[in-house]
Amino acid sequence: MVPHEVFRQSYHTMHFIFADDSIQRRPTRPGMGVLIAIGGFCIKGEKIKNLSSKIDEICSKYGFPPGEIFKWSPGRELWMWDSLKGEKRSNFFREVLDSARKEEIKGIVIVEDRNKRPATERAPNAEIDVIRLFIERIDWELFRAEDQGIIIVDRPSGDRAAEDKFLLSCLESLQAGTEYVGNKRFALNVLSTPSKLTRLLQLADLIVSCSLAAVGGEDQYSPPFFDKIREILCKESGRIGGVGLKIHPDFSYVNLYHWLLKDSYYLRRNIKLPLPIDGFPYSLGALIPKKQ
């Protein structure tokens, strides 16, 4: 149960972070291993009701039955598998993302190649590593906003393999080990709820799963929606790479920030490196992993 006083004292300044995970076992982009991702968005507390209501209206407009969820890649068991296809599905996703942009959400997606070395020291596996990177990015955004936040994640119903749904278990492990719980930017430990109970967790799935598809090289469905997601990803000094979207390891994939995000430079130790960087993978193009 969330203490009522937290909401009474901080409702109009508290940031809520809705997060989900995704995995891409066989990316089509040459040169990539298994990709895992954590992503979602920050939203100010006073904007939650507006965005939730608007997404509910959009779902009703497109015929979603009560209680039916939307996902980037719906399974056969979901209503939208058969009942929302083609241009209608595309228009639905566009309207949802446009509504999110109008409420000024800030998207953050971390993608990590599980076949590469972790970014943080002593990370036991890539899943823990990518979550630590995500928490670092959230912490920085809360610091910039001079605010506190609460992370809300999906609690899976049990119909998805544990290895495919690692976010909640890893976050709980980090909390048990007091890895970041003492951080003053987080008002509470991570909260979880089934995604079917909130459209905002479904939006988090759309953001992270579509972004991962684009990073992994999917070029049939994801590009037009990733273009819209790019508009809501966090930015800093005119760049998105390493801020709203981080692909680890950077120096294996840094040039993708240019091709995917249209970044003109990468910031490394306060030095601006023009993109694409000669001598690094993908310097010749988004599908050419060979070094120049």
Image (cartoon, rainbow, N blue to C red):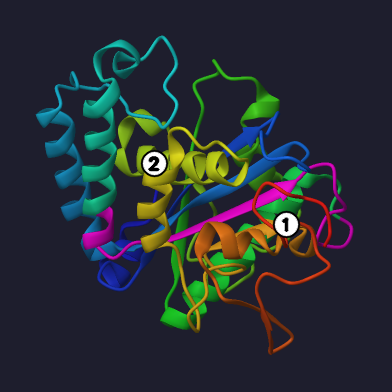
- Confirm whether the magenta stretch covers residue 120: yes
The numbered disc on residue 274 is none
Three-letter amino acid code of the residue under disc 2: Leu
Residue occupying the point 31% across, 73% down: 13
User: Which residues fall within the magenta stretch?
Assistant: 100-122
Residue 109's spot in the image, x, y percent? 54, 54
Provide the residue designation for mark 2: 201
Residue 66's spot in the image, x, y percent? 18, 21
> Which element is circle 2 on?
helix
Residue occupying the point 73% across, 60% down: 179
Residue 71 falls in image quadrant: top left
Provide the residue designation for mark 1: 282
Q: Nearer the viewer, residue 149 or 161?
A: 161
Residue occupying the point 50% across, 39% down: 209
- Confirm whether the magenta stretch covers residue 90: no
Please rate how many residues cluster around mark 1, counting C-alpha atoms within 10 Å: few if below 14, some from 14 to 19, many from 20.
many
Three-letter amino acid code of the residue under disc 1: Tyr
95 relative position to 290: left or right: left
Q: Quadrant of the C terminus?
A: bottom right
252 over 137 or under it: above or below = above
Residue 65 falls in image quadrant: top left
Evaluate whether residue 12 shows in this view: yes
> Which element is circle 1 on?
loop
Residue occupying the point 65% across, 33% down: 24
Comparing marks 2 and 1, which lies closer to the viewer?
Answer: 1
Distance of label 2 from label 1 (alpha carbons): 33 Å
76 over 255 or under it: above or below = above
Residue 267 falls in image quadrant: bottom right
Q: Nearer the viewer, residue 175 or 254?
A: 254
Residue 103's spot in the image, x, y percent? 23, 61
